[in-house]
Image (cartoon, rainbow, N blue to C red):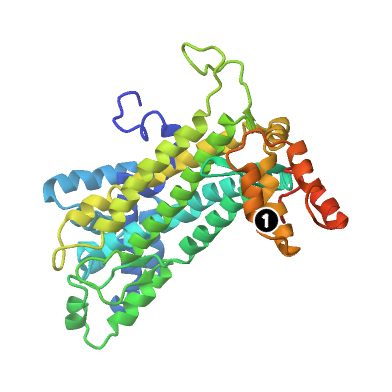
Amino acid sequence: MLTAISPIDGRYFAKTKSLADYFSEYALIKYRVFIEVEYLKAMAPVIDLPDTALVKLDTICSNFNLSDAETIKETERVTNHDVKAVEYFVKDKLKKLNLEQYSEFVHFGLTSQDINNTAVPLSLKEALDNEYYPELESVISKLKEMAEQYNGIPMLARTHGQPASPTSVGKEIEVFIERLEDQLTLLKNLPIKAKFGGATGNFNAHKISYPDLDWIAFGNTFVDSLGLVRSQKTTQIAHYDHLAAIFDTCSRINTILIDLARDIWTYISQEYFTQKVIATEVGSSAMPHKVNPIDFENAEGNLGIANALNRHFSQKLPISRLQRDLTDSTVLRNIGIPFAHSSIAFKSLLKGLGKISLNENQLSGDLSKNWAVVAEAIQNILRREGVEKPYEKLKGLTRGNETITQQTIVSFINNLEVDDKVKEELLQITPHNYIGYF
């Protein structure tokens, strides 16, 4: 691991190794073999493949191992074609299973992209279901736990970095929950599509060989059986617009999480949150006192790397010269990388959020030092009461005045020409209770 070029396979390997089941070279080969075998099984009614043969075919996938993948790679070194090497592997397995008479129906009528553009979406779907969604939902669950814990606790809001009308800690966290859940819903509702239609998408070879069969219906049924959606009109390759939408949505999710990481980082710098001190850890090689918000910084960095790749994929994959060029295959081999960096970030966020505690004394003290923020409340009540130019009155009192205290506000209210009942109402307003519904 110390010699790995990528930190995914080095420093962070323990955090990302589960993704190898979906995005490694071994995984890609395994998914390709699975698609070839499932296609041959789907052809059973056409080629009179008996049920006993179907059981045998299942063993090719259930017993598939690293040695099998290495065998395929050895063949690829001869063929210089990765999918053809998979085809030869499956045919060889049929011979060993005494099913050699069906070997020419392996990859029948297909092009490589019928395999690749089905295998890759399937691996992506299963990675989302088994890895990405659970990890992201863990982050959301942690935020919900914090939002409930800090519900109604007043906090000075800041707009343009300056003191603004107070809010509550719980509500500020709920903002991120809503944003993430909205995008997660969009992501889960995006179809994961596959291309399956022969050399240039028209089922040419299928139709000429078996003209009486409805191959479009066959392709739809086959792809649907894999939990995917078949694109109806394609070139040799998938048009990848659906994958672009997935990568774009993942990018938006990461952008929201970058926003979260930066906000929490800032709250820590303002001492609104304190960090758990772990005795054995070192915050700085020079300054013994340091406890740095490194988990949020780590998350931000990894999310940024993931987004750079996600955006490249969404912009590049839908573009291909005429029927196809090879750039799509080159790019698709890298789609696991942004998921790995996102996974590292999710874990860092969870770790960081688990190490912070709310510093209510600091929150309260900051509110007490910023009585000017009740000016909004006062001027709106005065508007309600028909007082002339209340905004301007409060602006003159507070804008640029750094010495606004509770007494300043009390004196202003007591000198107003309004009913005593209104004055009493105004005097009840403080930076600690002026937080609206949240």
Q: Residue at x 62, y 29 (%)?
A: 271
Count of labels shown? 1
Left or right placement of residue 101 versus residue 425 in this view: left
Is residue 351 in sight in this rendering?
A: no
Q: Quadrant of residue 248?
A: bottom left
Q: Residue at x 70, y 61 (%)?
A: 383
x and y percentages locating residue 158 in the rendered image: 58, 43
Q: In which quarter of the image is residue 399?
A: top right
SS at badge 1: helix
Left or right placement of residue 47 versus residue 276 in this view: left
Of 209 and 285, nearer the camera is: 285
x and y percentages locating residue 188 in the rendered image: 49, 62
Left or right placement of residue 426 versus residue 330 in this view: right
Q: Mark 1 points at which residue?
A: 390
Left or right placement of residue 171 versus residue 344 in this view: right
Is residue 377 in sight in this rendering?
A: yes
Of 420 and 110, nearer the camera is: 420
Tell me the kind of residue under disc 1.
Answer: Pro
Q: Residue at x 81, y 57 (%)?
A: 418
x and y percentages locating residue 49 in the rendered image: 33, 73
x and y percentages locating residue 274 in the rendered image: 64, 28
Q: In this view, does 237 lie above or below 425?
A: below
Q: Quadrant of the N terminus?
A: top left
Q: In this view, does 211 lie above or below 341?
A: below
Disc 1: CA contacts within 10 A as few (<14), some (14-19) or many (>=20): many
Of 83 and 356, nearer the camera is: 356
